Amino acid sequence: MREYFLTRGYQVVGERVRTPFSEVDLIVKNEREILLLEVKSLSHADWLEHRVGFRQKLRLQRALGYIQARYSLPVLFHLVTVTKDEEITVYTDFLG
């Protein structure tokens, strides 16, 4: 997963970063933005809505606000799914 974003010009800021609200799986940044990434393994796309529930989305929104207050760059939240064949899909601005 790290390599996917490194090859796209991002630097890893942190992994499994704990905030007072939720843990963020991966945080990456480039010169334009910071991405908070929730990473989920997925066997079938139909299961996606069940992997991130309403309560988890609320906690992640609070974590986004917490981290956003600490940076001058725009902070976005993306959901990233990885299949067992290592196919990566990025759902941009997942909480927006």
Image: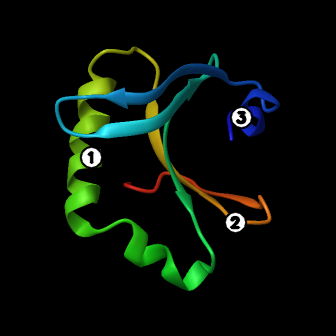
Q: Which residue is mark 3?
A: 5
Decide if residue 68 is on the left or right side of residue 45: left
The secondary element bearing badge 1 is classed as helix
Q: Which amino acid type corresponds to the residue marked 2 in the rendered image? A: Thr
Q: Quadrant of residue 45?
A: bottom right
Q: Which residue is mark 2?
A: 83
Q: Which amino acid type corresponds to the residue marked 1 in the rendered image? A: Gln
Q: Which residue is mark 1?
A: 61
Q: Position of residue 28 (x, y in %)?
A: 57, 27
- Residue in view at x 21 percent, y 54 percent: 58
Q: Quadrant of the C terminus?
A: bottom left
Whichever of callouts 3 and 1 sits on the residue coming sooner in the sequence is 3
Decide if residue 56 is on the left or right side of residue 90: left
Q: Which amino acid type corresponds to the residue marked 3 in the rendered image? A: Phe
Alpha carbon distance from label 2 to label 3: 17 Å
- Residue in view at x 25 percent, y 28 percent: 19
- Residue in view at x 42 percent, y 76 percent: 49
| Residue 75 vertical placement versus 44 (above, below) | above
